[in-house]
Image: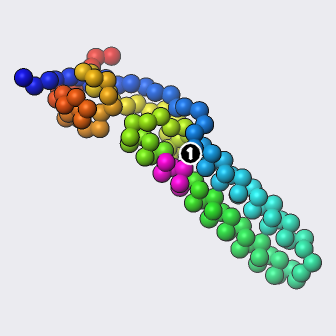
Amino acid sequence: MEITAKRHRVSRQRHAANFETLVDASANFWLILGIMVAIANLFSDSVLWWRLLVSIVMLFGFWLQWLLLRCVAEHLRLQKKIAGLPYSGTISSNKHEFVWNCGNCGQLLYTDTRCEFCGAKIVGDAEG
């Protein structure tokens, strides 16, 4: 006898600060620090064009570091979402999300045809 279940749409709220939020905060800190260092460099005692060139290169380097850390944080969130674990922050500007759970065991569904946890065949959506 085959088990069948309907899937349920569940709204879930994001959780508070996790590791990915710390990586995001570090990215913002490095970007702000880079801007301050580049501005401070403009007031050093060297030739103007050299100061400007060095400041631009420094800003670009800090921006690349900010981008790398933001990508790492986004990657952590995506891995946690795929694994069905709670994560903090947003993925590509999503503020709220809906997920589908199995009507038989309540586990997160990754496909529309069957539950990987209990093996129930998904026959449709639950009412409401």
Q: Is residue 25 above or below residue 58?
A: above
For the point 70% across and 57% down, the residue is: 30
Q: The magenta stretch spans which residues?
A: 71-76
Residue reaching furthest to the left: 1
Q: Which residue is mark 1?
A: 20
For the point 27% across and 23% down, the residue is: 105
Question: Residue 119 vs residue 87: left or right?
Answer: left
Q: Is residue 127 above or below residue 92?
A: above
Would you say residue 115 sits in the magenta stretch?
no
Question: Residue 85 vs residue 23: left or right?
Answer: left
For the point 24% across and 35% down, the residue is: 116
Q: Quadrant of residue 123?
A: top left
For the point 62% across and 48% down, the residue is: 24
Q: Which percent across, then down, holds residue 107? A: 32, 28
Quadrant where the N terminus lies? top left
Helix, strand, or loop for circle 1? helix
Q: Quadrant of residue 109?
A: top left
Q: Which percent across, then down, holds residue 100? A: 33, 29
Would you say residue 73 sits in the magenta stretch?
yes
